[in-house]
Image (tube, grey):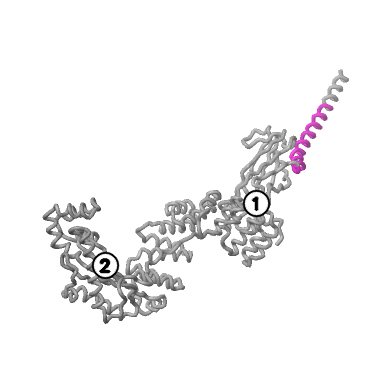
Amino acid sequence: MADIYTTIIDMMKNTFKLLSAAAILAAAVSCASIEKMAKMAENVKVTCEPGVLEAVNGSIDAVVSVTYPEGYFNPKAYLEVTPVLVYDGGEAQMKPFTYQGEKVKDNYKAVSSKGQTVSERVHFDFVDGMEFARLELRGLAYKGTREVALPVKKVADGTNTTYMLVKRSGNVSFKKDAYQDVIPGSTEGQIKYLVNSADVRNSELKGKSVKDFLSAIDKINADERTRITGTEILAYASPEGPEGKNNELADKRSTSANKAWKELTKKIDIESPAIQSLGEDWEGFQKLVKESDIEDKELILRVLSMYSDPAVRESEIRNMSQVFTALKGEVLPELRRARLIANVEYQNYTSDELLKLLEDNADVLDEEALLRTATLVKDNDQKEDIYKRAVKKYGSDRAQYNLAALYLNENKVSKAEEALAKLNSADPDVLNAKGVVALRNNDYATAANYFRNAGNADAKKNLGIVEILTGQYEHAAETLADVDGCCHNTVLAYILTNQLGKAANAVHCNDPKVKYLKAIIAARTGDAAGVKENLNAIKVQSLLDRAAKDIEFAGYEW
């Protein structure tokens, strides 16, 4: 019996030893399993889309896919994967992605031990220095209290920031003045005739109209700023009676008026007039009727609009006997005439004179003269004073708008906003300027809305800027395709949509930034010589410093 007990005890001891060894072995296997994940890390495959990181709308976004091979992921382990963007000046870390083995009872994404690919979106807010960056994954495997750091996996190099080359300040044009360097005008006198007569009466030659005309000629000739550019005699007949007879009468009046002209001007230095016989004066008739107090003038005007034939017009008007009687007394005598006309040009203040008047006697400058003078001065403070003067003295909306445009050119955005708020109108220029304010404040949605509502050439250029800044590259290329004077951003939009042929053809300017864009076109088309030529032609240090780090030129020497 004792032997049996001894045997049982020995068997139990052996079993205990076996169980202990199994437990120790299991523990060892358990510990080795997460270490194995670290050792097998080289078998883990990582891909990134896009392959080269790209900044869009102030962000770096990508999709990272990790393929874990069969037998890699321990069924009872956890794995934390932290995307990290390492850049010149620091690093940015995302919140880790946590995965669990298939036997773990938790709420993380499970990864099968038979092998599996997991994909995650990564996002980083762009900061200066990220132009030269490296995206990597840092892993930490753990089980219970045991944890093991995995080797760092590099995902992608570089950050393409080409869109940041956009000229983004926005286009604002000043409203133009209506100042006339030469002001056209005319002065005239009239010779009136009796009904059915072409004789010039002596009373007409000595009348007020002719005297005033001759006096005006004398003043024009005495004024060094004014000159006569041509003279005319226009002869008419009143629209009554047969049209043919009236045309003949107008011819005779042109002849007699010319004879009178020669007599009146024989002591005046003035050229001979161009003579026209214009027949029945229906245009003058209509004008005088409109200006008259004739009771049925609306009826007369309606007849004129209904009939174009002179005979029918006269017949219809004569049928209104009372009306025709009024016309014979008030209107028709005024149309039996010859007009003596001198066409005149007045030389307005020159640029030098405007600047001198601004200093010596600015009160004589009207609204248009002030607006023109503002374009002549170079000092912005002086421009501001001129616009404020025009606003105060003439309530000039154009000056108020130009004041806002001036502030935007100086990047005084809040002052521009205040100036625009004082305008009652909201024409396309004003809407565009408000859009530029929003653009400068990085409110792209509001800016785009203003630009679409404005719809003018500046607004179209500016909408293209917003579309580039917000990553709508295809829209930007379409928006800027036919816009004049937008070389840089149009070329850039074509580059961003990889329409390199169109980008090259759109180059119509040659400033340093456009040379930089030409270098990018060359790099993307494999033209090493073009890269070198264009970058070496740039003498702007900030652009050269950028090029040294630009992923666009990776692999090129210059």
Identify which residue is drawn at 48% across, 66% down: 410
As for residue 25 lying within the magenta part, the answer is: yes
Could you tell whether 396 is left or right of 60 in the image?
A: left
Question: Residue reaching furthest right?
Answer: 3
Crowdedness near tag 2: few (<14), some (14–19) or many (≥20) residues, C-alpha within 10 Å: many
In primary-sequence order, the first of circles 1 and 2 is 1
Could you tell whether 238 is left or right of 140 in the image?
A: left
Residue 226 x, y percent position in the rendering: 33, 76
Q: Nearer the viewer, residue 489 or 439?
A: 489
Q: Which residues are magenta?
A: 14-42
Query: Does residue 262 sit above or below 21 in this rendering?
Result: below
Identify which residue is drawn at 62% across, 59% down: 518
Residue 558 x, y percent position in the rendering: 70, 62
For badge 1, the amino acid type reads Leu
Q: Is residue 551 visible?
A: no
Q: Which residue is mark 2?
A: 234
Identify which residue is drawn at 12% across, 54% down: 321
Q: Assign the magenta stretch its main secondary structure.
A: helix
Q: Nearer the viewer, mark 1 or mark 2?
A: 2
Badge 2 marks a residue whose secondary structure is strand
As for residue 23 lying within the magenta part, the answer is: yes
Q: Which residue is mark 1?
A: 85
Q: Nearer the viewer, residue 472 or 485?
A: 485
Residue 265 x, y percent position in the rendering: 26, 78
For badge 2, the amino acid type reads Leu
